[in-house]
Amino acid sequence: MNGEGAPRWWLLWSLGGITVVHLVANGGWTPETTIGLPIGLAVTLVLVFVRRLPWWLTGELPARRRGLILAGLGGLALLDAVIVAALFAHPPHGADVVNAGVVVAIFGGGTAFAASRLVPRRPSTRRASLRRRLWAATAAVWSAGAGLLALEAGAIVLTGGWLPWFIPIAGGVAVVALAVWRSDLAGPARCLATDRWTPVAAASFDVRPGEPVDGWAVLPDDVRIRFHLPVTPPDIAAELAGRRRLWLAGWPSEHLVAGLPDGDSYAVGTIGHAGRGGKNTVPAGSGRR
């Protein structure tokens, strides 16, 4: 989930993916593309950057509505299964092969992406766990890519029919989804691997170990930000509540990675908005490590 005020970049990437699928399916630029793409881009930019939109426009359901997400994803998965079963029962021919592949990519990819982003899950906060998951994600990406090539080669040799068209589209969606998962893990891992820690003044009205927290922080050069941590490990919570300070690994961009130089936990947060100076600046924390 995005922190409060963070741009919803995934909507822009989704528009790009839909555009690519449309161009491939239609053999290039069409009059419909000329009309629809600017309209779609304008609407998407509003959804990406405008804050406090209704949840039914952005898909960012509050916690009490997350049961609807699980029910919706179950329905989408069932629809995907029906589509794939229908294609195996009635294999497409000719130009319908590409159309069938596009349909599978849209529905299957949409379900996989929604599941990866919307299913409620408690973030892991152990650095050792992050390293293991990054290794697993890296192995999964390479294994999926190699398996896709092997399966495609086998399908071409054994069938020579529509299946070789179906495999790259469906398999490509899986590889991209795994690559996105690895990218989400690689960012925090790179920050922690630098072993460069910056203490910044920070404060929050309500800090509870193991719970989400929203607060304010002051980066170097007097840059003030709002931040959101989806889960706060006990050591980070104690530092924030007791010393009004966060230790940041690497350097924050859209996300920040918090922890302690001598600790074994971490938390990935999102940055809401930034500014400079002003009377609301949080008092500076003490000490450096």
Image (cartoon, helix red, strand yellow):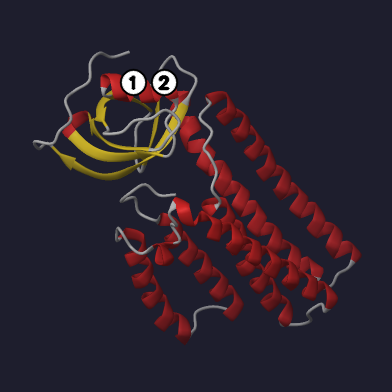
User: Are there few (<14), some (14-19), or many (20+) residues within 10 Å of tag 2?
Assistant: some
Amino acid at circle 2: Asp
Pointer 1 residue: 239
Looking at the rendered structure, which numbered label has been put on residue 3? Answer: none
Q: Which residue is drawn at 49% across and 63% down?
A: 14
Is residue 28 found left or right of 3 in the rendered image? right
Marks 1/2 in contact by CB < 8 Å: the verdict is yes
- Classify mark 2: helix, strand or loop: helix
The x, y position of residue 289, in whole percent, is 33, 13
The x, y position of residue 271, in whole percent, is 32, 42
Q: What number of labels is visible?
A: 2
- Classify mark 1: helix, strand or loop: helix
Amino acid at circle 1: Glu
Q: Which residue lies furthest to the left in this view?
A: 279
Q: Which residue lies furthest to the bottom in this view?
A: 31
Q: Which residue lies furthest to the front in this view?
A: 64
Quarter where residue 254 is shown: top left
Q: Residue at x 61, y 34 (%)?
A: 133
Pointer 2 residue: 235
Q: State the residue in front, 64 or 159.
A: 64
Residue 198 in sight here: no
Is residue 11 found left or right of 221 in the rendered image? right
The x, y position of residue 184, in whole percent, is 51, 42
Is residue 77 found left or right of 6 in the rendered image? right
Q: State the residue in front, 287 or 280.
A: 280
The x, y position of residue 174, in whole percent, is 66, 55
Q: State the residue in front, 190 or 146.
A: 190
Quarter where residue 225 is shown: top left
Q: Which residue is drawn at 57% across and 24% down?
A: 128
Q: Which residue lies furthest to the right in this view?
A: 158
